Amino acid sequence: MQPPKKLAPPKDQPFTTAELSQYDGSDPSKPIYVAVQGVVFDVTHRADCYGPGKWYHIYAGKDGSRGLGKTSLTAEDAIADYGDLSKQEKKVLDNWYKYFLKRYNVIGQVIDGPQVPESS
C-alpha cells in the first residue's frame, strides 16, 4: 500500500456524468477520475488500480457509489444511485468516502447525478 500523498485544496469543478465518463483512463493524456457520493476524485496516481484492465477500473469515469457500498465489482452495481442501500451498506459507502478524502484530490462535483438524501 502506498502512503497517502499530500493533497491539494479541494476544487469545485462541475461535471456532468457524460463529462466524467471521459476520464476513465482510456485516453492516456487525460487523468483518471472516480466519483463517490457525487464528489469527483483524481485517482490518476493509482492507475495501477483504476486504469484499464485493473481491479477497480469498473469505477473509473463514473460515480460507482452503489457498488462501493455493496462491496461489488459488477457493472450493474457500479452506478451513482445508492438510495436503496441498507444501513450497513451506507456505512460501508461512508467509509469509502472518508478513505477517498484522505488519499485523493477532490476535483469537483457531479451535477446531474441522483440526489440522495443523507441517512438519518
Image (spheres, grey):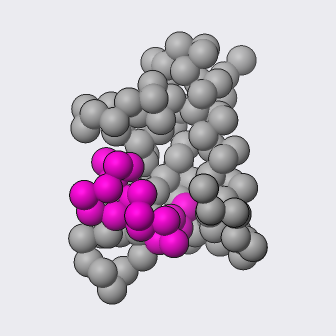
Q: Toward the viewer: 43 or 116? A: 43
Residue appearing at x 55%, y 61% in the figure: 41
Based on the picture, tell me whether residue 23 belongs to the magenta stretch.
no
Residue appearing at x 70%, y 70% in the figure: 5
Q: Is residue 29 left or right of residue 31?
A: left
**In which quadrant of the rendered view does residue 27 lie?**
bottom left
Residue appearing at x 49%, y 65% in the figure: 46
**In which quadrant of the rendered view does residue 94 lie?**
top right
**Residue 105 shows in the view:** yes
Vertical relation: 120 (above or below) 44: above
Vertical relation: 75 (above or below) 10: above
The quarter of the rendered structure image containing the C terminus is: top right
The quarter of the rendered structure image containing the N terminus is: bottom right
- State the image coordinates of residue 22 (x, y, percent, origin top left): 30, 69
- State the image coordinates of residue 63 (x, y, percent, origin top left): 42, 48
**In which quadrant of the rendered view does residue 87 lie?**
top right
Q: Toward the viewer: 104 or 110? A: 104
What's drawn in magenta, residue-wise?
41-59
- State the image coordinates of residue 62 (x, y, percent, origin top left): 37, 53
Which residue lies most toward the front here? 1
Residue appearing at x 55%, y 21% in the figure: 89
